[in-house]
Image (cartoon, helix red, strand yellow):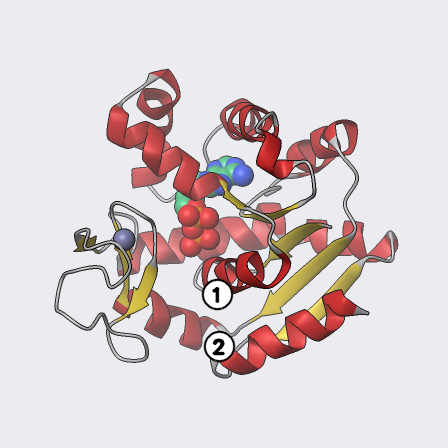
């Protein structure tokens, strides 16, 4: 099963993806995580991507496409995968057509007010990329990941100025892809303002049909 999860930053793509990984036993591919990993080790892609990410802009298409292509050569992706954060532009969607066939696109719908609240309180594990929320899903021990004991941090780009920019990019560059996949008949909307357990249930029922 090959799935794309769409939605503005903070809509819960990462959290939903991680639950679907367990349910369907296929990997999550987050281009954001892959980029942060490249930046951490400062490889060629990381060096080129960092200024864009820090500014809340999309990185150039060729970087995201290269990371995705590399990841799809891993054997764990043969049975399927969940794309979280890719494609984000029409160019990326066109490229994806050449690489693979997509079965389902889930579109998480969430208002700006809810997004701002979520992103402000979002924390991630530097090591395993687990996602926390200081109020709704706090780690058991402050600053320490429940799953791996790694350090929990706030992403550099999770600040009020950058989130506004990222929401703007989403409207301008990514939202048009919703009608593109809708025309293909594989897109399903999910109301994503409620609690995450409800969202997961709806997603699983759509994908299990
Ligand atoms: P969010 O969905 O909350 O913005 P991500 O981790 O998916 O979080 O993305 C963080 C940043 O990584 C984006 O703002 C962008 O700079 C970069 N990025 C991730 N995926 C892509 C992509 N497919 N194309 C271009 N830039 C990307
Ligand atoms: Zn961790």
Q: Quadrant of the C terminus?
A: bottom right
Q: Quadrant of residue 159?
A: bottom left
Q: What percent of the width, then of the height, locates residue 125? A: 26, 53
Q: Quadrant of residue 158?
A: bottom left
Above or below 66: residue 22: below
Tell me what residue is drawn at x 31 percent, y 21 percent: 47
Mark 1 Cα-neighbour bin, 10 Å: few <14, some 14–19, many ≥20: many
- Residue 170 located left or right of residue 164: right
Q: Nearer the viewer, residue 143 or 94?
A: 143
Tell me what residue is drawn at x 40 percent, y 51 percent: 165
For residue 57, say whether it is visible: no
- Residue 64 located left or right of residue 2: left
The residue that disc 2 covers is: 196
Q: What is the secondary structure assignment of the residue under circle 1?
A: loop
Q: Is there a contact, CB below 8 Å, between mark 2 and mark 1?
A: yes
Above or below 87: residue 188: below
Q: What percent of the width, then of the height, locates residue 84? A: 54, 49
Q: Residue furthest left?
A: 142
For residue 18, say whether it is visible: yes
Q: Which mark is residue 12?
A: 1
Mark 2 Cα-neighbour bin, 10 Å: few <14, some 14–19, many ≥20: some
Tell me what residue is drawn at x 63 percent, y 58 percent: 24
Residues at marks 2 and 1, CA–CA distance in whole angstroms: 8 Å
Above or below 111: residue 73: above
- Residue 77 located left or right of residue 120: right
Q: What percent of the width, then of the height, locates residue 85? A: 53, 47
């Amino acid at each position: 099963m090959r799935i794309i999860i769409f939605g503005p930053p903070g809509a819960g793509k990462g959290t939903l993806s991680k639950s679907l990984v367990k349910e369907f036993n296929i990997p999550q591919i987050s281009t954001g995580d892959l980029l942060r990993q490249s930046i951490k080790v400062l490889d060629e892609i990381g060096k080129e991507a960092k200024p864009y990410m820090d500014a809340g802009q999309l990185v150039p298409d060729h970087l995201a496409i290269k990371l995705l292509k590399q990841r799809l050569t891993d054997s764990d992706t043969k049975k399927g995968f969940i794309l979280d954060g890719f494609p984000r532009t029409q160019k990326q969607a066109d490229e994806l057509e050449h690489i693979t066939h997509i079965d389902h696109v889930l579109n998480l719908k969430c208002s700006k007010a809810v997004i701002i609240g979520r992103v402000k309180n979002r924390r991630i594990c530097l090591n395993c990329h687990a996602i926390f929320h200081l109020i709704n899903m706090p780690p058991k021990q402050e600053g320490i990941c429940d799953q791996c004991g790694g350090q929990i941090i706030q992403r550099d780009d999770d600040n009020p100025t950058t989130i506004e920019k990222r929401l703007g990019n989403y409207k301008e560059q990514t939202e048009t892809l919703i009608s593109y996949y809708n025309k293909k008949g594989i897109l399903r909307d999910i109301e994503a303002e409620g609690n995450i357990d409800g969202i997961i249930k709806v997603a699983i029922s759509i994908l299990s049909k």
